[in-house]
Image (cartoon, grey):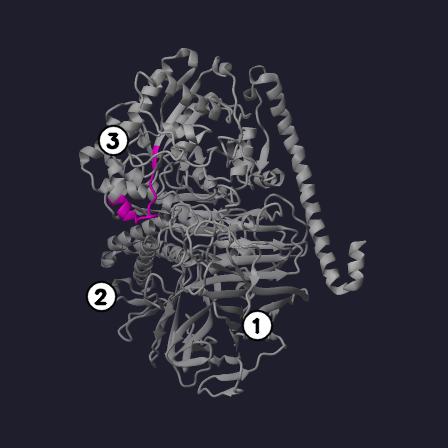
């Protein structure tokens, strides 16, 4: 009644309120339906647990019940209330009780696993940490483990280990090998770093695994079998898949939302088989252990009570530098107190073991950069050994405690639970999904780091694209150079050193304090400098390799380091600046313009280069004139620079090939000039320019319109921002409003920082007093609208070409928030798609994870990482935002997608970094916006991009690479195209890398390479007719790969080359299932 009265007084306003209330009710209804279906599943699980509870665990042991249940993380999210009651000593959990006699029939086996978590850069640079801490830890490890055979230690970061190894003598090296052989020292994961799992791309994660595993094989002859990830801020199933493909059997994770840990503890599902959400069988299952408590430090790893566990961290003995915040210090163990102390810690071990399904217990013993001093080794190992000896001497305590490695634990666990026997019924449940977004306490969601330091998140992907291009070209050039004596001057060894260094710099940056943007300012500069140097070095590798491959007469090959044959068309002047195009000088003599296509698909791509004259002629590899658009190079928003002109044309390039074009100055140039409309206050109509037609005009309520063969776009004449898209194939209009918005941070004590996002409510619209200058380009090859706002230069470009590049809109934002105070800038796209609180984000560029925006969670919890794409959809359309860098994304309202582009925060967020984020750069964020028709509803727990979408992402992340010849004269004859593949790869087959393997002895390259292929999963309900794909699909079969080279041998191997299958033999045809990533050892001739 109240509503209807209000309605009579103010009908229009009230209608929109009613509409909002109805929307809200519909949302709640949809959520409730899902909750009910999940409650059903949970009731079944809880009934069993309740039966166990009332019948006592002896009469009805849980372990007899094999678990077939498949848990999906999305369902877990639905049933959890995400409340945060005080759980007693285990703040985020509950009180754990047990009966004294529970271990009578089978004793508790305790494995205490000493470890030291070494961040390759965080509060200090990699080198400083190594000098001050890491080298001492490893030096002491060799001495201290040899003192007692029962001592154990684990290590994970090979970046540090290899640096240390390089500096020690052969005696020490032999000791290490002996310790490994005797099972006292274990390498866990064995990647270059402990990689971040949110912002990292699977290309780089695989690469740093290979780098670590290859180093281990060559130097130590060891093959890690268990994963150890105690510090990444949330966990991705992509990591589980890659470890499984590398031949791992077990993995451990730690940073998971406290509500999920508690839920898993009540259900005893902290140990589970992690399965990929697209796997219909169980081939991707890997055994995963989730640590139950708040942290991986000692207070939170012996049991539920940190006040007690802290007393068993013997580095905190009175008189030391660290103490226990709970104000009860440890006591050194001696005959007088050993009984009491052993009993106290056994009580913690027993309580912790009640959260698991077996009588085997893992108790890690370590923290960041622990075990630096010899005294600390003594304190921990001697005191614990006394405790173990005492416990084990009391048969009535029914416990066997010892030091162990991670694999000691997993072996005992598998033995205890009869894993490995033929029975398919496992004690452990199966789970699929991911563990984002992480919260460690209260509403402290770690969604800030999905965006922090976006400049470097982008630079990371630029390096990835260069490294892949360089690896492939180098591998082919190496084979070519071995074919004749004349080409032995090819700098294969020097360039292999540069490649190795680049792999290691990229690997280092995948560390969970590097790509995440959560290190100190000067450490960020150190990472950035490494990335920057490697980009420059890789350009050299690309140029040297292309030079050799493109010569017609290979015997004419000469190598001159001082004056390279080719040069790239862009330069970056420092580690924190954006690259700019160099200007190519034209003469009447043709100059070669080489364009390399780093993708395995035939490609029609628009290429733009800068030249010094508008009188330009371009010849194709076949010598035919090519249509060229000449655009102005601008100095600011409205001034034309006549130092340079941009020419754009469509290049047609073979897969992994090089097209050789020719550029020359020509008075009778048939190039087509772009023309310009500039919307500016106080315009002066015609703006005289000696080359271009430029019209100035006032802002207007009329729309600005761009169109090509596929779509028509309407932009606001006031703001220049997109408002509507018409898709020509079906004639439909779609609302598509682009806007910018600001987030602030809370006024509470805890504020946003490098890790946390703690906004002060919904975003506020980006308000501008004066309309921005809008520059509209109309051209034959592309048209675009550029809006010059104070904090962002926003461009939407439409390519007027047939095929892939004409079907999506290129979006770029040059963001600069350096003057802001506690603000974050988001780009939001609001459409009329009825997405119903569902959206989809990719994980590591490898797979898609469906998401639900939940009203029971705070705003910051509904932000998820996007590595390469996010989409929303309804029964008729899908809208995908493709990204060339990792950022945080959300869909907070029906039909909306938003992406956070940069954040500037003036304070620390109390997670150890000790600073805010104030080193913002002028940052380029690049996207593509793709609107596709689709059919049918989709509530399945798995979703895939279309083939067009995959290809769009590939082209966005691997742009073509233009190069020009350096000299004007004396250039030997070049072939017109270099085309190494027989044909384009099947549409769904991606060459992840072709990576030359290091020789067994030195740092030289071997004659073998690792060919890594990924067969992408795609949604076949999207039509592939008329989308301009130049490939076909072949059900995962590939045979004839190369045309210029002979495949001498091709043998399957595990992902990181550690294991060869027992039946590994030379194969002639590759056969892969959807979503599979496979590595092959390949020899070319």
Question: Which badge, 3 or 1, comes first in the chain's sequence?
Answer: 3
Quarter holding residue 212? top left
Residue 5 lies, with reference to residue 1075, above or below; the image says below
Work out whether residue 645 or residue 900 is closer to the camera in this orientation and state it. 900
444 horizontally vs 1055: left or right: right
Q: Residue at x 38, y 36 (%)?
A: 1059
Query: Residue 291: horizontal and vertical position, in percent?
Result: 46, 33
* x and y, in percent, of residue 944 in the image: 57, 49
Badge 2 element: loop
Q: Vertical placement of 605 versus 770: above or below? A: above
Residue under pointer 3: 375
Q: Secondary structure at mark 3?
A: helix
Q: Kindly indicate whether the residue at mark 2 contacts the one at mark 3 (C-beta within 8 angstroms).
A: no
Judging by the rendered image, the residue that carries numbered circle 2 is 562
Measured as percent of width and height from the top left, residue 510 is found at 39, 48
Q: Residue at x 63, y 77 (%)?
A: 702
Please identify, in this view, whether the residue under mark 3 or under mark 1 is nearer the observer: 3
* Label 2 Cα neighbours within 10 Å, binned few <14 / some 14-19 / many ≥20: few
């Amino acid at each position: 009644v109240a509503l209807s009265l209000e309605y009579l007084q103010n009908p229009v306003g009230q209608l929109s309120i009613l509409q909002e209330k109805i929307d809200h009710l519909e949302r709640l209804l949809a959520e409730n339906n899902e909750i009910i279906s999940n409650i059903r599943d949970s009731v079944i699980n809880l009934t069993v647990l309740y039966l166990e509870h009332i019948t006592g665990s002896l009469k009805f042991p849980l372990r007899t019940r094999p678990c077939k249940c498949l848990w999906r993380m999305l369902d877990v999210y639905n049933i959890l209330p995400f409340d945060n009651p005080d759980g007693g000593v285990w703040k985020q959990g509950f009180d754990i009780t047990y009966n004294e006699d529970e271990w009578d029939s089978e004793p508790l086996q305790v494995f205490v696993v000493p470890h030291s978590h070494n961040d390759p850069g965080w509060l200090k640079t990699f080198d400083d940490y190594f000098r001050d801490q890491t080298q001492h830890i490893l030096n002491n490890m060799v001495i201290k483990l040899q003192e007692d055979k029962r001592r154990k230690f684990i290590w994970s970061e090979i970046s540090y280990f290899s640096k240390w190894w390089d500096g020690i003598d052969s005696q020490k090296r032999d000791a290490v090998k002996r310790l490994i052989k005797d099972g006292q020292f274990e390498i866990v994961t064995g990647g270059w770093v402990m990689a971040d799992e949110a912002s990292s791309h699977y290309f780089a994660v695989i690469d740093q695994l290979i780098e670590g595993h290859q180093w281990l094989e060559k130097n130590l002859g060891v093959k890690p079998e268990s994963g150890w990830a105690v510090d990444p801020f949330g966990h991705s199933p992509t990591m589980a898949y890659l470890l499984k493909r590398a031949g791992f059997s077990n993995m451990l994770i730690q940073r998971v939302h406290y509500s999920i840990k508690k839920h898993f503890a009540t259900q005893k599902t902290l140990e589970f088989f992690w399965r990929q959400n697209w796997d219909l069988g169980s081939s991707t299952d890997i055994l995963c252990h989730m640590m139950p408590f708040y942290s991986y430090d000692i207070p939170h790893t012996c049991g539920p009570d940190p006040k007690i566990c802290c007393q068993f961290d013997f580095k905190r003995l009175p008189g030391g530098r660290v103490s226990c915040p709970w104000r009860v210090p440890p006591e050194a163990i001696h005959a007088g107190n050993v009984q009491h102390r052993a009993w106290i810690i056994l009580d913690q071990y027993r309580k912790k073991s009640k959260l698991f399904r077996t009588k085997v217990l893992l108790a890690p013993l370590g923290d960041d950069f622990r075990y630096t001093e010899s005294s600390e080794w003594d304190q921990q190992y001697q005191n614990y050994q006394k405790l173990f000896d005492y416990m084990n001497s009391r048969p009535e305590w029914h416990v066997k405690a010892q030091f162990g490695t991670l694999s000691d634990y997993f072996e005992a666990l598998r033995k205890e639970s009869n894993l490995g026997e033929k029975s398919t019924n496992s004690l452990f449940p199966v789970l699929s999904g991911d563990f984002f977004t992480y919260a460690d306490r209260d509403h402290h969601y770690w969604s800030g780091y999905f965006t922090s330091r976006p400049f470097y998140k982008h630079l990371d992907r630029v390096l990835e694209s260069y490294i892949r291009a360089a690896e492939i070209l180098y591998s082919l050039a190496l084979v070519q150079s071995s074919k004749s004596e004349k080409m032995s001057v090819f700098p294969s060894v020097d360039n292999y050193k540069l490649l190795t260094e680049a792999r290691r710099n990229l690997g280092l940056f995948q560390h969970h304090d590097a790509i995440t943007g959560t290190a100190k300012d000067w450490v960020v500069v150190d990472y950035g400098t490494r990335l920057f140097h490697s980009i420059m070095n890789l350009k050299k590798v690309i140029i040297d390799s292309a030079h050799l491959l493109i010569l017609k007469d290979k015997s004419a090959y000469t190598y001159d380091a001082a004056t390279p044959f080719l040069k790239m068309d862009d330069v970056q002047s420092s580690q924190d600046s954006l690259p700019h195009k160099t200007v190519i000088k034209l003469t009447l003599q043709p100059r070669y313009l080489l364009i390399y296509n780093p993708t395995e698909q035939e490609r029609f791509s628009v290429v733009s280069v800068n030249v010094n004259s508008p009188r330009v002629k371009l010849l194709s590899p076949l010598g035919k004139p090519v249509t060229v658009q000449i655009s102005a190079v601008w100095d600011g928003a409205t001034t034309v620079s006549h130092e340079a002109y941009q020419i754009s044309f469509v290049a047609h390039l073979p897969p992994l090939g090089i097209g050789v074009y020719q550029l020359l100055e020509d008075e009778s140039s048939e190039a087509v000039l772009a023309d310009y409309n500039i919307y500016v206050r106080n315009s002066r109509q015609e703006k005289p320019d000696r080359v271009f037609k430029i019209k100035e005009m006032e802002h207007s309520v009329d729309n600005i319109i761009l169109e090509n063969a596929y779509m028509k776009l309407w932009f606001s004449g006031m703001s220049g921002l997109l408002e509507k898209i018409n898709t020509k194939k079906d004639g439909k209009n779609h609302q598509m409003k682009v806007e910018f918005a600001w987030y602030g941070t809370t006024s509470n004590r805890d504020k946003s920082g490098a890790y946390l996002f703690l906004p002060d409510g919904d975003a506020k619209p980006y308000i501008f007093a004066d309309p921005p200058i809008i520059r509209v380009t109309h051209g034959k090859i592309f048209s675009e609208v550029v809006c010059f706002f104070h904090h962002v230069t926003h461009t939407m470009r439409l390519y007027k070409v047939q095929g892939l590049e004409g079907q999506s809109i290129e979006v770029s934002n040059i963001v600069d928030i350096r003057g802001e105070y506690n603000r974050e800038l988001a780009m939001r796209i609001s459409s009329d798609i009825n997405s119903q609180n569902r959206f989809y984000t990719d994980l590591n560029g490898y797979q898609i994870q469906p998401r639900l925006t939940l009203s029971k969670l705070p705003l910051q919890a509904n932000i998820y990482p996007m590595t390469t794409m996010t989409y929303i959809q309804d029964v008729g359309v899908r809208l995908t935002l493709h990204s060339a860098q990792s950022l945080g994304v959300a869909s907070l309202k029906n039909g909306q997608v938003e992406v956070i582009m940069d954040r500037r925060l003036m304070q620390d967020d109390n997670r150890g970094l000790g600073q805010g984020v104030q080193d913002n750069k002028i940052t380029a964020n690049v996207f593509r916006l793709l609107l596709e028709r689709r059919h049918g509803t989709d509530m399945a727990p798995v979703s895939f991009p279309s083939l067009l979408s995959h290809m769009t992402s590939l082209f966005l992340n691997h742009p073509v690479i233009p190069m020009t010849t350096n000299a004007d004269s004396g250039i030997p004859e070049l072939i017109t195209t270099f085309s190494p593949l027989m044909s384009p790869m099947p549409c769904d087959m991606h060459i992840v890398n072709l990576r030359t393997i290091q020789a067994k002895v030195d740092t030289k390259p071997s004659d073998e390479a690792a060919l890594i292929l990924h067969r992408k999963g795609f949604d076949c309900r999207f039509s592939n007719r008329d989308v301009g794909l130049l490939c076909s699909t072949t059900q995962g079969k590939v045979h004839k790969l190369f045309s210029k080279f002979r495949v001498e041998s091709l043998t399957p191997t595990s992902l990181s080359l550690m294991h060869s299958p027992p039946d590994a033999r030379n194969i002639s045809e590759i056969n892969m299932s959807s979503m599979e990533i496979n590595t092959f050892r390949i020899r070319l001739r």
